[in-house]
């Protein structure tokens, strides 16, 4: 027996899986669902992940929400996760995906004190690449509507906000370099640095992305396919940059280290250039790093969002207020310009990951999960 609140009412329902659907007051929750499961750890997402069609829809416990996902976010680190790098002790099969926005369709009795069926929520939790995800009510975030823009804040926005706040020491006039600046996380680093009255330089891969960065207020976009980043930094910023928000790794990391000013700080939030490789790393000139840092009294520090979860809710609240007041652009890329069109359905997650690693996206890559024709909700 399970306590659930359905269609705005509290009820005790026997969720027997002998039936194909649970039907209550005109609502239908299927017995089985689709989800993406990591079945073979590999940095090749298509090799690592399997789309399964017959997974049981999970039952919410007393403090849980059952969320029917409408939008799910694609992150560069999905490949690190599917490669088993974050926690090598986790054994396959395990669920993929980090974040989603959707509708509460069932919930435990204690959860009904703060949430209702039909409410839109955003969440960061494992297993979002699924039609339904079980989310602890304590971590779910109410949002005004099921809009993909809210999803951009869950991982990307909070990563930029917390890392720059805790490690960046931003202040007026500081020079800030953001690598992969037109991506899901970079777009927020650019905007937050501009809010702090910094001079912002952003690297990107096309003139179209340069134009997007200018629209965000970026002072000096650098299209690395048209200009050499190191040469631009050396010529236009001979005294160096004060803060680097770095997510690329490899040769870009080396350029960023060389560009640091005296007492400069480099924040590593990723190293995407190495994620698809067996080792997970692209070569850097680490042998010279100690001498370079010492010469400038500079520093390099890593940032991993999971180590700052005590700051997470306050960051989300702040970013949601900024977006609501029009102070923050949340650029979403639903794949409309990709060769095969918009990212729709779980099967398109594979295509969305490829699209990201081909550096085609501007903003956060989001996949839409249309409601099933079998669902009456």
Image: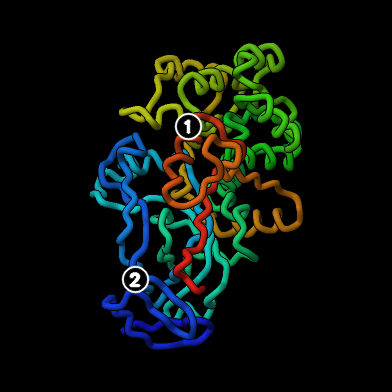
Using the image as rendered, state which of residue 251 and residue 19 is in the foreground.
Answer: 19
Compared to residue 228, the image places residue 165 above or below, namely: below
Using the image as rendered, state which of residue 141 and residue 4 is in the foreground.
Answer: 4
Which residue sits at x=23%, y=49%? Answer: 91
- Using the rendered view, name the quadrant where residue 12 is placed: bottom left
For mark 1, what is the residue?
Answer: 357
For mark 2, what is the residue?
Answer: 31
Using the image as rendered, state which of residue 75 and residue 261 is in the foreground.
Answer: 75
Indicate which label's residue lies in the foreground, 1 or 2.
2
Compared to residue 102, the image places residue 187 above or below, namely: above
Please state if 151 lies on the left or on the right of 207 as rendered. Answer: left
> Image quadrant for the N terminus?
bottom left
| Mark 1 and mark 2 residues within 8 Å of each other at the beta carbon | no
- State the image coordinates of residue 167 (x, y, percent, origin top left): 57, 40
Which residue sits at x=44%, y=76%? Answer: 28
> Count the marks: how many?
2
Kindly report the distance in space between the C-alpha atoms of the residues bearing marks 1 and 2.
35 Å
- Element assignment for label 1: helix
- State the image coordinates of residue 120 (x, y, percent, origin top left): 57, 67
Marker disc for residue 310: none
């Amino acid at each position: 027996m399970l306590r659930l609140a359905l269609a705005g009412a509290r009820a005790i329902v026997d969720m027997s899986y002998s039936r194909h659907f649970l039907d209550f007051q005109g609502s239908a929750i299927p017995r089985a669902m689709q989800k993406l499961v990591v079945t073979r750890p590999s940095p090749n997402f298509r090799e690592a992940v399997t789309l399964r069609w017959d997974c049981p829809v999970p039952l919410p416990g007393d403090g849980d929400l059952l969320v029917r996902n409408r939008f799910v976010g694609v992150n560069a680190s999905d490949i690190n996760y599917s490669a088993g790098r974050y926690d090598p002790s986790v054994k396959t099969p395990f669920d993929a995906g980090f974040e989603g926005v959707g509708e509460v369709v069932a919930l435990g009795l204690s959860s009904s004190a703060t949430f209702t069926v039909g409410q839109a929520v955003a969440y960061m939790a494992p297993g979002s690449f699924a039609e339904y995800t079980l989310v602890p009510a304590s971590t779910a975030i109410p949002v005004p509507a099921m809009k993909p823009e809210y999803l951009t804040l869950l991982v990307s926005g909070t990563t930029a906000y917390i890392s720059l706040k805790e490690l960046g020491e931003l202040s007026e006039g500081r020079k800030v370099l953001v690598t992969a600046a037109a991506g899901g996380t970079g777009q927020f680093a650019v905007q937050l640095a501009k809010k702090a009255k910094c001079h912002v330089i952003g690297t990107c891969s096309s003139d179209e992305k340069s134009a997007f960065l200018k629209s965000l207020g970026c002072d000096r976009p650098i299209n690395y396919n048209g200009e050499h980043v190191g040469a631009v930094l050396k010529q236009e910023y001979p005294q160096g940059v004060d803060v680097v928000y770095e997510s690329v790794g490899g040769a870009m990391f080396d350029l960023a280290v060389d560009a640091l000013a005296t007492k400069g700080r480099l924040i590593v939030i990723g190293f995407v250039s190495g994620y698809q490789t067996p080792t997970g790393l692209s070569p850097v000139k680490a042998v010279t790093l100690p001498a370079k840092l010492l010469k400038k009294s500079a520093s390099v520090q890593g940032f991993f969002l999971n180590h700052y979860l005590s700051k997470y809710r306050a960051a989300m609240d702040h970013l949601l207020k900024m977006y609501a007041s029009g102070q923050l652009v949340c650029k979403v890329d639903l794949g409309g310009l990709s060769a095969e069109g918009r990212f729709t359905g779980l099967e398109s997650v594979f295509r969305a990951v490829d699209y990201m690693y081909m550096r085609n996206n501007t903003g956060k890559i989001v996949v839409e999960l249309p409601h099933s024709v079998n669902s009456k909700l």
